Every structure is written in structure tokens, then in C-alpha cells.
């Protein structure tokens, strides 16, 4: 069951289930906390699981036209303060990983472990920045078609067939995202800095989960990133959406990671 708290001039929505070590789940772009339903159910058997709707996603409001990673991190801080949680394990999918890193940069003492799920500590390259700028121009004229195309492309070709039902359900959630939330998220991701040092310089547990056929992140670069930052790496055979494409394997990997933090 979700609840909400005020944040600046916006409302933040999140769920809070279970007892034990706090695990904070941060969804990706065009997703919301509903993506964690199955994983949250498993993790909350032994942990306190907080799943947050980031600004401009799910039931959380937009706040301006640039949702920077630092601003997103402030929302995580606000929820933890409200719940009186001192330390937590962060698991972030894609955009959620960027937010987790921004939070860990500001408040490393509050982090017991950090998992980048189909995510990276590197900044956008110039080609990716141009794609985000172009997407923000195109989205204003054909929102539904753009969201459908970009979201579907996150799945491997086989997964689009094998997980057609799950893909369609996730797409319907993506289409709930307001245009302002889409644009503000893109702008925030475009300006995010390199945060590799957050992984390299901190002693909390670190895990990078990689899709072997991820259309967004080069798996070889992700493997090198894990080695460079002394992070554990787990590789799955599919694309960018491991929570759908490799559900059972991901649940096992994250349950094990949380136990070891």
C-alpha cells in the first residue's frame, strides 16, 4: 500500500513493507514502483522494503522542468528521514541507479550497499545527449508513439515475444508518465556527471547487474566498469529489463546481495 509525503511543492509517493534491514528500490525512466512488485514481495519477507515513485513518475508529482539526479536523491533522503531510516541498501534500475549514486555521493554514511541494475556510473556520451535532446523535441508532438518505440527497444528481440504480456503491462505504466515528467527526466539524465569515484572510493557492498544483450549499455564496458571500481558483477543473457527478462535469476542475485550487505 502506497502513501505520500510533501516535498517542496510536490507530493512524493512510496510504499513501505516488511521489517528488518531497509532496502530502497528505485525504478528506471518511464517506470514506477510497480515494477518491483514481485521482487518487493520476496525481499520484504526478511527486510523492510521501500519502493519510491521518483518525481514525474507513478503517483509522484513533477517539480519543474529538470529533474536532476541530485534532486531525485533529495527525494530519497526525504522519504528516509520521514521513515527514520538511518542506513539502507540501494537498488536502482537504469535511471534509479543514477539516483542511487547521487544519494551515495551526498550521504555515503547512510549506504550499506548499492546495486546498479542495468545501470552505470558513467555520464552520457555526446551521442546519447543528442538523442535525449531530439527525443524531448519529438515527444511533444507524438507522445504515445515515442514512448512505445523507446520502451519496446529496451527489450531484446526474443524477449519481446517471450515476455509480450509483461512488456505490454509495463508499457501501459510507461504511458502514464506525464510529458513534463518525461522531459524533466531526460534533461536530468543528460546533465548528470560521471560518478565512478563513488563506487571506487567507498567500502559499502557494490553490485553491477549486466544484460549481455543490453541495447542501451555496452556489456563489455559495464564489465570493465565493475573491475575498475572493485564491484561484483552478475551477467544475464538478455537486455536492459532484467526484472522482466530474468526475473527468477535476478531475485536470487538480489536476495543474496542483500544478505551479504
Image (cartoon, rainbow, N blue to C red):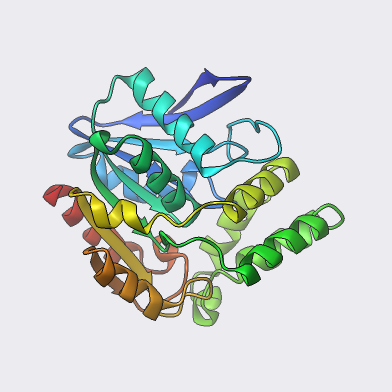
Q: Is residue 73 visible?
A: yes
Taking depth in this image into account, of 157 and 193 the one nearest to the observer is 193
- Say whether residue 149 is left or right of residue 256: right
Give residue 118's quadrant in the image. bottom left
Can I make out residue 176 in this image? no
Q: Residue furthest left?
A: 260
Q: Position of residue 253 (x, y in %)?
A: 23, 61
Depth check: 125 or 245 in front? Answer: 125
Where residue 137 sits: x, y (%)? 81, 57
**Residue 15 quadrant:** top left
Tell me residue 121's x, y (percent). Answer: 41, 59
Left or right? Give the position of 20 relative to 190: left
- Residue at 61% across, 23% down: 10
Quadrant in which the N terminus is drawn: top left
Q: Position of residue 219 (x, y in %)?
A: 40, 77
Give above or below for 68 relative to 147. Answer: above
Q: Is residue 184 left or right of residue 125?
A: right
Pick whichever, 240 or 86, lies toward us: 86
Name of the residue lying farthest toward the right: 141
Residue drawn 45% across the image and 77% down it: 218
Q: Residue at x 40, y 60 (%)?
A: 243
216, 176: nearer the viewer? 216
Q: Is residue 228 above or below residue 254?
A: below
248 shown above or below 85: below
The residue located at (36%, 42%) in the rendering is 105
Amino acid at each position: 500500500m502506497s502513501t505520500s509525503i510533501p516535498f517542496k511543492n510536490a507530493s512524493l509517493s512510496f510504499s513501505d513493507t516488511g521489517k528488518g534491514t531497509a532496502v530502497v528500490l528505485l525504478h528506471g525512466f518511464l517506470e514506477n514502483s510497480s515494477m518491483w512488485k514481485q521482487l518487493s514481495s520476496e525481499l520484504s519477507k526478511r527486510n523492510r522494503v521501500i519502493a519510491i515513485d521518483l518525481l514525474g513518475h507513478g503517483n509522484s508529482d513533477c517539480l519543474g522542468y529538470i529533474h536532476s539526479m541530485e534532486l531525485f536523491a533529495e527525494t530519497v533522503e526525504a522519504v528516509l528521514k520521514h521513515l527514520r531510516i538511518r542506513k539502507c541498501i540501494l537498488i536502482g534500475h537504469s535511471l534509479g541507479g543514477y539516483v542511487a549514486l547521487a544519494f551515495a555521493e551526498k550521504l555515503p554514511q547512510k549506504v550499506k550497499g548499492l546495486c546498479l541494475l542495468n545501470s552505470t556510473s558513467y555520464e552520457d556520451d555526446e551521442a546519447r545527449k543528442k538523442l535525449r535532446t531530439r527525443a524531448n523535441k519529438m515527444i511533444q508532438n507524438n507522445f504515445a508513439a515515442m514512448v512505445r518505440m523507446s520502451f519496446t527497444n529496451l527489450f531484446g528481440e526474443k524477449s519481446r515475444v517471450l515476455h509480450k504480456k509483461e512488456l505490454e503491462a509495463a508499457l501501459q505504466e510507461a504511458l502514464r508518465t506525464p510529458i513534463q515528467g518525461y522531459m524533466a527526466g531526460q534533461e536530468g539524465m543528460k546533465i548528470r556527471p560521471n560518478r565512478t569515484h563513488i563506487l571506487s572510493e567507498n567500502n559499502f557492498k557494490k553490485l553491477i547487474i549486466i544484460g549481455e544483450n543490453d541495447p542501451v549499455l555496452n556489456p563489455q564496458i559495464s564489465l570493465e566498469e565493475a573491475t575498475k571500481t572493485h564491484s561484483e558483477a552478475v551477467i544475464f543473457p538478455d537486455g536492459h529489463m532484467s526484472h522482466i527478462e530474468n526475473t527468477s535469476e535476478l531475485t536470487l542475485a538480489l536476495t543474496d546481495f542483500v544478505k551479504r550487505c
